[in-house]
Amino acid sequence: MRARQHLKPDPKQLALNGRVAVVTGGTGAIGTEICRQLLEAGAAVAAVGHPSETDRIPNWRRGLGHLGRGIHVELADLADYDATAIAVAGIEAALGPIDVLVNGAGITRDARLVKMDPQQWRKVIATNLDSVFNATRTVFPGMCARGFGRVVNIASVNGQKGQFGQANYSAAKAGIHGFTMAVAQEGAAHGVTVNTVSPGYIETPMTASIKPQALERVLGQIPVRRLGRPQEVARVVVFLCDEASGYITGANLAVNGGLFMSA
Ligand code: CAA
């Protein structure tokens, strides 16, 4: 009986107590929910947003309620390697060495290929894919040296199946999972897991800006028959960040309401 009691999980012992987590795109809709759930799991959390967001940060922090007080925020252009390294140094100075990195920064510039200009291509590749290299390259050596790390890259269903009007975005998101599989092999012997989470169409300002006719077309293809919720993505991310998830690496977990299924 005594032994059974001993095995009961201590509710005060949260899964990510003592861990330092960074969420790029942490001020966006899905990123905010990831920050919230990481904080609830006991991590010290830093959100990285874009410098253009300076004015909305106080409100954003208030939206997180009591959890918002403890969160560290850095604003940096993650498409730029040096700016990323400066942001990471700021986080480490404030919170300590980084154990968990969630690469969630992303934008869209949708257009059919025949209308897509090189700037729309470059901007999406730089923000959605270069940023993943920049942030991971900066924190990965420290994770390997300390023998523990969790990297979760947020891709998209549209990186898996392609999407009409998203040649840039689909390419960047498919590239993210290639990156995941390569770096997972490099981190595996050092206690560092690297995984992809591929959300489908989630209730965010990004999907709210899709033209109604185009959104109707997509909704008709989702077996669960609704958009997903940011919370439904965040819980998968936090699951992968848990120390107990150490045997999952190089995986791509879909959270897409059945829009795309693969073996
Ligand atoms: N399949 C085939 N044809 C399609 C189509 C589709 N899925 N979607 C649009 N079209 C066709 C239209 O029927 C129309 O054809 P006609 O000219 O013959 O009538 C033509 O495309 C219209 O194209 P236009 O270039 O004139 O431009 P538009 O202003 O209508 O916009 C578009 C085109 C930007 C691609 C628009 O259709 C669109 O926004 N589509 C949705 C793209 C999308 O799903 N984005 C996801 C954003 S959210 C996100 O990215 C998060 C995530 O990870 C899931």
Image (cartoon, helix red, strand yellow):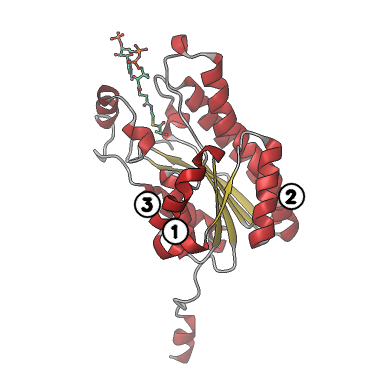
Q: Are marks 3 and 2 in contact (CB under 8 Å)?
A: no
In-image side of 200 versus 50 (left or right): left
* Residue assigned mark 3: 231
Total numbered badges shown on the rendered structure: 3
Q: Tell me the crowding category of disc 1: few under 14, some 14 to 19, or many 20 or more residues within 10 angstroms, Cα based.
A: some
Q: Is residue 186 visible?
A: no
Q: Tell me whether circle 1 and circle 3 mark residues in contact (CB < 8 Å).
A: yes
The quarter of the rendering in which ligand 1 is drawn is top left
How many angstroms separate mark 1 from mark 3 (CA)? 8 Å
Among the two numbered marks 1 and 2 on one chain, the one whose residue lies closer to the N terminus:
1
Q: Please tell me how crowded label 3 is: few (under 14), some (14-19), or many (20+) other residues with Cα within 10 Å.
A: some
Q: Which label was assigned to residue 206?
A: none
- Under mark 2, the amino acid is Pro
- How far separated are the C-alphas under marks 1 and 2? 26 Å
Q: Which residue occupies 49% across, 87% down?
A: 3
Residue beneath the point at 71% across and 38% down? 82
User: Element under label 1?
Assistant: helix
Can you say which quadrant of the picture contains the C terminus? top left
Quarter of the view holding residue 122: top right
Q: Position of residue 135 (x, y in %)?
A: 64, 43
Tell me the tag on residue 141: 2
State the separation of the CA atoms marked 3 and 2: 30 Å
- With 73 as the anchor, is 200 left or right in this view? left
Amino acid found under the numbered disc labelled 3: Gln
Q: Which mark is residue 37?
A: 1
Residue 132 located left or right of residue 86: left
